[in-house]
Image (cartoon, grey):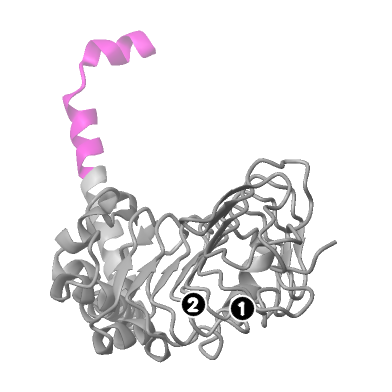
């Protein structure tokens, strides 16, 4: 086996084009490892459709020889794990595409040794068990020069970056995830980082008063190019309505809280009125009893009068028949 980059031999199952610096190794579906003989002149390396389950440490430079690769495409390889410093030796790498894999584990140091990385694509890459590890892997120390980060289709419930203002991001793609809201801390950071463009369509935003900070950022900022396609999912009455077309009172926490307080106060006042009424009844129970007795007596007297008149007016012949 020749050392990595030791000669110009094109790796088996690959197609090489020295003029453009491209090595395309997308023809070996049965291959389970990274090719070991990558030419020194390679600037674009494409590995797609292989069965590479794990990227170990120094996966591309096992002999310690640095490569000049600037673009690395690893999509659709069924990658399940990325170990620490898997890309060590690719110091000139500008673009890394790991989209459409099945990551179950990713080391916090997975991207160490990539000081020139500008674009990182992780679309539809993570299984639910790995999303919690994503924030550590995307540390600012590792990716401080990153300009574009794509995380579409990963079922994310929050932005997996500790602080947006410590990155050099120009584009953050979070399309088709499970975001219901954007936290106030992230909104404050976005206001400070005007260069960032954030893509957020196809997320199930919950349009209640918790969305207030995000709503006003969306209305007053041009940092979200797909703002018109950001729709409410809940509540049912607002489903399908663009967030930016909501009214201010729809997301006004103060009005909502005041309305809730008003209902509480109304309930308390009603309860107090009921208690006072019962106390009045209790304190006047003697008078009320006499009043009821008087009404009963009056009704009885009236009924006796009606009974007497009935007997006086009855037909004498009926009495004879009765006898």
Q: Which residue is mark 1?
A: 111
Tell me, for residue 130, which label it has, or none. Answer: none
Asked whether the beta carbons under mark 1 and mark 2 sit within 8 Å of each other, the answer is yes
Q: Which residue is mark 2?
A: 117
Direction from residue 29 to residue 261 in the image, left or right:
left
Name the quadrant of the C terminus: top left
The residues colored magenta run 305-323
Direction from residue 240 to residue 88 in the image, left or right:
right
Question: Which residue is found at the position 51% from the left and 83% from the top?
Answer: 143
Direction from residue 80 to residue 201 in the image, left or right:
left
Question: Which residue is found at the position 78% from the left and 69% from the top?
Answer: 3
Is 320 covered by the magenta stretch? yes
Q: Position of residue 241 (x, y in %)?
A: 23, 52
Label 1, residues with CA under 10 Å away: few <14, some 14-19, many ≥20: many
Front residue of 149 and 187 = 149
Comes first in the chain, label 1 or label 2: 1
Question: Which residue is found at the position 35% from the left and 83% from the top?
Answer: 184
Name the quadrant of the N terminus: bottom right
């Amino acid at each position: 086996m020749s050392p990595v980059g030791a000669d110009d031999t094109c790796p088996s199952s690959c197609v090489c084009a020295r003029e453009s610096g491209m090595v395309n190794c997308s023809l070996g579906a049965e291959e389970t490892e990274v090719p070991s003989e990558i030419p020194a002149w390679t600037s674009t390396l494409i590995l797609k459709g292989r069965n590479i389950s794990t990227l170990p440490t120094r996966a591309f430079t096992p002999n310690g020889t640095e490569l000049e690769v600037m673009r690395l495409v690893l999509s659709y390889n069924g990658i399940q794990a990325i170990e620490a410093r898997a890309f060590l030796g690719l110091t000139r790498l500008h673009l890394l595409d790991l989209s459409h894999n099945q990551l179950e584990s990713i080391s916090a140091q997975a991207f160490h040794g990539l000081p020139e990385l500008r674009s990182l694509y992780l679309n539809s890459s993570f299984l639910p068990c790995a999303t919690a590890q994503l924030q550590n892997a995307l540390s600012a120390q590792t990716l401080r020069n990153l300009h574009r980060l794509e995380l579409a289709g990963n079922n994310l419930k929050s932005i997996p970056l500790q602080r947006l203002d410590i990155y050099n991001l120009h584009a953050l793609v979070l399309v088709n995830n499970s975001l219901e809201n954007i936290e106030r801390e992230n909104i404050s950071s976005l206001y400070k980082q005007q260069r960032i463009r954030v893509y957020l369509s196809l997320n199930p935003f919950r349009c209640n008063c918790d969305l207030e900070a995000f709503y006003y950022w969306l209305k007053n900022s041009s940092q979200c190019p797909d703002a018109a396609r950001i729709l409410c999912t809940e509540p049912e009455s607002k489903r399908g309505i663009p967030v930016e077309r909501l009214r201010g009172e729809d997301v006004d926490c103060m009005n909502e809280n005041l309305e809730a307080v008003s209902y509480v106060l109304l309930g308390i006042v009603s309860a107090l009125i009921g208690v006072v009424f019962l106390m009045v009844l209790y304190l006047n129970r003697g008078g009320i009893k006499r009043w009821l007795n008087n009404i009963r007596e009056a009704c009885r007297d009236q009924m006796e009068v009606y009974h007497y008149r009935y007997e006086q007016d009855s037909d004498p012949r009926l009495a004879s028949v009765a006898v």
